[in-house]
Image: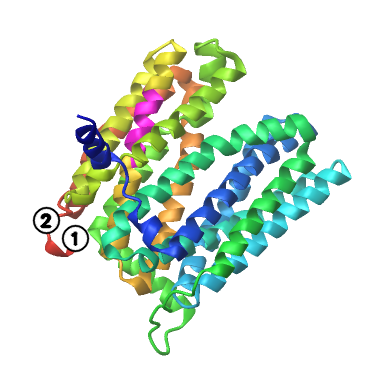
Amino acid sequence: MQSRAVRRLRGVAVDTTALRESRDYRVLVIGGLISGIGTQVTLVALPFQIYVLTSSSFLVGLLGLVELVPLVVVALLGGTLADRMDRRRLLLVSQVVQAGTSLCLVIGAAAGSPPIGVLYLIAAVASGASAVDRPTRAAMVPALVGPERLRSAISFNYGLVQVAMVVGPAMGGIIIAAGGLTWAYAVDVATFLAMIAAAWAIASPPRPAVEPGASFLSAVRDGIRFAGRSGELMGSFAIDILAMTFGMPRALFPALALTVYDAGPEGVGILYAAVSAGAVVAAFSTGWMIHARRLGRIVVFAVLVWGVGIACLGLTSELWVGALCLLVAGAADSVSAVCRSTILQTVTPDEMRGRMSAIFTLVVAGGPRLGDVESGTVAAVGGTQLSVVSGGVICVLGIVPVLAAFPEFWRYGEKPEHHL
């Protein structure tokens, strides 16, 4: 009986073979987890600092726009660099720059009251560096684990990102309360040192093949054209933008917790944590996906579950029901993210992985920020719950035109070359 239970558990648990077999992948993952937790600490500390200095929610919200602009501008350039130079060295440089920005925040916090413009500038530089870091790291993974371990490695990576998103904010609140902002930013600097050490320790993966005589700008254009010609990639990008723009009401979590659920600030934290908690459980339970083929259809089903979960969130007046809706939605989003990442890495040749990972980064990071604007605007006109419900419904209905525009995405998995 026990052995049968163990077999069933192994059937759903994410495969960690890549972690055991590849020393470089193991080092990269551990460094990424540590630095990710530190980054999440700063993502709590910086908005808190701006609000304390200005007492303005508008200026806090403006931070998202300040970070989005360099992300959009730098991401594709960073991805192109990842396809033209030593990815290990590029990762190392991006980590050093990010550590430097956090060190500047330490100095500013220790000094007392830094100008808001300086904080925005530091945040913009850090966002630009992360736009180089994220596609570079993503492009390195296939070479470190091999095609047979790629799906499980992607699932494991995504699960660790969600773990950092649960642990980091909680740590940030505790550190700020106990030691102040200076210590919070100092912790971030220390965690970046772990990732710098990891980047230094791993062996350089094979350098991507570069077409002789190809200019940098032509490489950028080639990346955009490659994405535009791939219905599988365009479909995966479009369906995620749909789900995050209309079905991600994170900007309304404070209003829901305070005015609908009457749950206080603790309720806000519960709503944020519920999404990541569901994603963690799902990401570490994707052993069944090793043999899954029709990943496009799995993504469609996951987005459908996400949309329904968000719509139900807006219909309930009970915090525990809302948290449960977000738990289910977060799990569905985790499945979608793993499948879309697998599609990206499978259909993209190695010499294009940096650029395609950069576009993926733009979609993943930009969609929720567009969602903040959409949900906040609709809430201002029709109320909080209407905004949440309508966003979930549009998410569900929008699946149809996405599939009509990109039928290749729905059919992904039918061709032998799609199988790892």
**Residue 114 visible in the picture:** no
Q: Amino acid at mark 1?
A: His
Res 234 quadrant in image? bottom left
Left or right of 33: which side holds 304? left
Callout 1: SS: helix
Give the residue at x 73% y 37%.
50
Residue kind at label 2, given as amino acid type = Glu
State the image coordinates of residue 3 (x, y, percent, origin top left).
22, 36
Q: Nearer the viewer, residue 174 or 218?
A: 174
Image vertical order of residue 307 relative to residue 195, above or below: above
Q: Check disc 1 and report the residue beneath it.
A: 418
- Which residue is rendered at x = 74% and y = 29% of the image? 177
User: Start and end of the magenta stretch?
Assistant: 325-334
Q: Position of residue 195 (x, y in %)?
A: 59, 58
Mark sitting on residue 414: 2
Give the answer, above or below, for where 270 lies relative to 352. Answer: above
